[in-house]
Amino acid sequence: MIDEELQQWQEHTEDLIAALVEDGTNEEVHHTIEHHFSSVDFDVLEKAAITAFKNGFEIEEPEEAELENGDKVFAFDIVTEQALDFDIIFDETKKMFELAKQCKVDYDGWGTYFEE
């Protein structure tokens, strides 16, 4: 049984891949996948980044951002290179979702870039 929030990430993955394919992205090349994590507590976010690094993931430097309502949030990305394949990317998404839960940070989904 898949939980409701993970179900939303499954739909996000299906929709984003479909939109990229419809727009004509090159399905034959690997895409840079950026998984987004955030927390209002920098120390908690930093511990999550360290955990991700120790688990072999490539992480981007944590940054501070301001939300539309003016609140501050801290964020970092885990970057991978993957084929634009639902099973591969959703499996990775599940791992990222579980990492976020384990580390008590928010998983804000993933994104990628159009490839020629």
Image: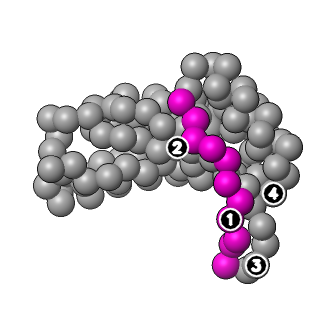
CA gap between label 4 and label 3 equals 12 Å
Q: Which residues are magenta?
A: 58-68
Disc nearest the viewer among 1 and 2: 1
Q: In terms of image quadrants, where is residue 59?
A: top right
From the image, which quarter does the N terminus lie in? Answer: top right
Residue count near mark 3 (Cα–Cα under 10 Å), binned few <14, some 14–19, many ≥20? few
Q: Is residue 59 magenta?
A: yes
> Where is mark 2, residue-wise?
35
Secondary structure at badge 2 equals strand
Q: Which residue is mark 3?
A: 70
Residue flagged by tag 2: what amino acid is it? Answer: His
Residue 70, how many percent across, how many down?
A: 76, 78
Residue 6: in sight, yes or no? no
> Mark 1 belongs to which amino acid?
Ala
Q: If you read the primary sequence from the N terminus, does the residue marked by circle 1 or circle 2 appear first?
A: 2
> Which residue is rendered at x = 79% and y = 34% of the image?
47
Task: Tell me the residue that label 4 is attached to.
Answer: 40
Label 1 belongs to which residue? 65
